[in-house]
Image (cartoon, rainbow, N blue to C red):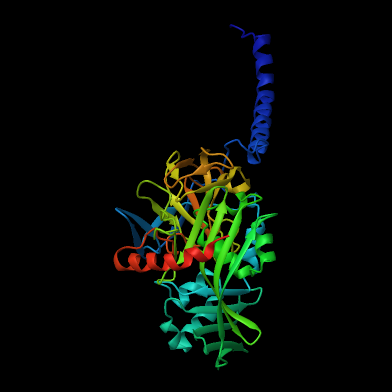
Amino acid sequence: MVQQIKSPDNEKNKLKIPYFSILGVLVVVILVTILWRPLNLDRTVYVPLNSQAQTTVTDTSTSSVVIGDGRIDMVGDKSKSENVTESSDVPEDAIAKDELDDISEEKDNTVQYTIARGDTLHDILFRYNVNKNDILQLTSKFKQLANLRIGQQVSWTTDDNHNLLTFNWTISSNNVRIFEKSGNKFIESSETIEGTSENVVITGDLKTSFVADARKAGLTSNEIGIITRALQWRLDFRRLKVGDKFAVYLSREMHGKRLSNSKLLGVRIKNGTKDYYAILADDGKYYDINASSLSQSFFRYPLAKQARVSSGFNPRRVNPVTGIVTAHNGVDFAVSRGTPVLSVGNGEVVIAKYSGSAGNYVAIRHGRQYMTAYMHLDKILVKPGQQVKQGDKIGLSGNTGRSTGPHLHFELHINNKPVNPLTASLPINEGLTGKSKKAFIEKVKNIKPKLSF
């Protein structure tokens, strides 16, 4: 009988195995803890909301949006289940505001607007975030409001919750229609006091800032806002310097002692040795003195190729993880990690960093009214303060921040309010031609001499 003798080394090895297992578990726990909230915010980190890479939803219909030569398949309701990426898209970093933004916010409660080609009352009020129920009630009850004409002026007042209080429609100098809210209904009245109209020229020198000096010269906040919007694509008002000059040609209409309407006919701003002009045309839009457009066109979406929309714009979306109603202020494109992300327009990068649940995050300011945001990027290719052009590559799509799968979350903000980037009304870069251009050039000949310093 052979007796088996146990080796002392084997006994020691068996005793070491539990210790290695415990040590391994501790290492995993420590790594998970560190990676869940990165200490280095510039670092790329993948953080799933749950153990599944995707969330399954059941849909019942489909639709698509044609963009140029491509097509975006919209994920609506379908008869079969489909995997859809979900995410949390709330950056920790807010975009810094300046006094020009304060001007825009002042005008949230009282707004004056000149009707331009293609405008409808519904689109105008919706663009300024007026309560949708008030828009529907006003446009459905008063059918005559469908007869707004180019060049006419409208104005309205809202409360702090964007509920419409009054709406004024100036048909002519002695015919102003007033729609005032009483309880839950709007009541129409008219004002037939003969208005007095006068054209004025206001000039000034820059000593502190454009907003402060324009106010000192006698311009209202609304008039300053019209000027900054008209020239927002040509001139950065924050870079005006002491000694620069401005001249503004206005048509002001008074009803008694009340300024009822103000129309910007032309403006000239001298920045160093360069002059910037904006002249009002018969179509209600502003052009430079050569009849070239002052607007900038936008790409409708920030990718070079066709992409599926995995989650649409929805201010009342129920978060699939928390079950809480959380606004989805943008559109999610289902693209693989590393897909090039493009700037939809010319602008300045204001944020480019890792930012909380939004992951690697880029925000670009386009002029004064528009801002775009790009979230969950795998890699950022731009820096804050950098000027980018339409179509420039600003990053690579990814899965950073709190996201359940690779995708790009894209937002468009107009007047500091999120809007649906697939349906929002965007400016078109088209100059005047033919008879319209000829008539405009004649108008410039009359207005330009008035804008002297």
Residue 197 visible in the current orientation = yes
Q: Quadrant of the C terminus?
A: bottom right
Q: Quadrant of the N terminus?
A: top right
Residue 184 visible in the current orientation = no
Q: Is residue 226 left or right of residue 105?
A: left
The residue nearer to you, when weighing 406 against 111, is: 111
> What percent of the width, then of the height, locates residue 151?
45, 76
> What percent of the width, then of the height, locates residue 221?
64, 68
Residue 389, placed above or below residue 245? above
The residue nearer to you, when weighing 284 against 118, is: 284
Q: Is residue 61 left or right of residue 40?
A: left
Residue placed at 65% from the left, 16% from the top? 13
Residue placed at 51% from the left, 83% from the top? 169
Residue 245, placed above or below residue 77? above
Q: Is residue 292 left or right of residue 374?
A: left
Within the image, what quadrant is residue 165 found in?
bottom right
Q: Is residue 194 left or right of residue 19?
A: left
> What percent of the width, then of the height, locates residue 166?
59, 83
> What percent of the width, then of the height, locates residue 326?
59, 61
The number of numbered discs placed on residues in the rendered structure image is 0
Residue 346, placed above or below residue 267? above
Within the image, what quadrant is residue 284 found in?
bottom left
Residue 322, placed above or below residue 33? below
Residue placed at 60% from the left, 56% from the top? 245
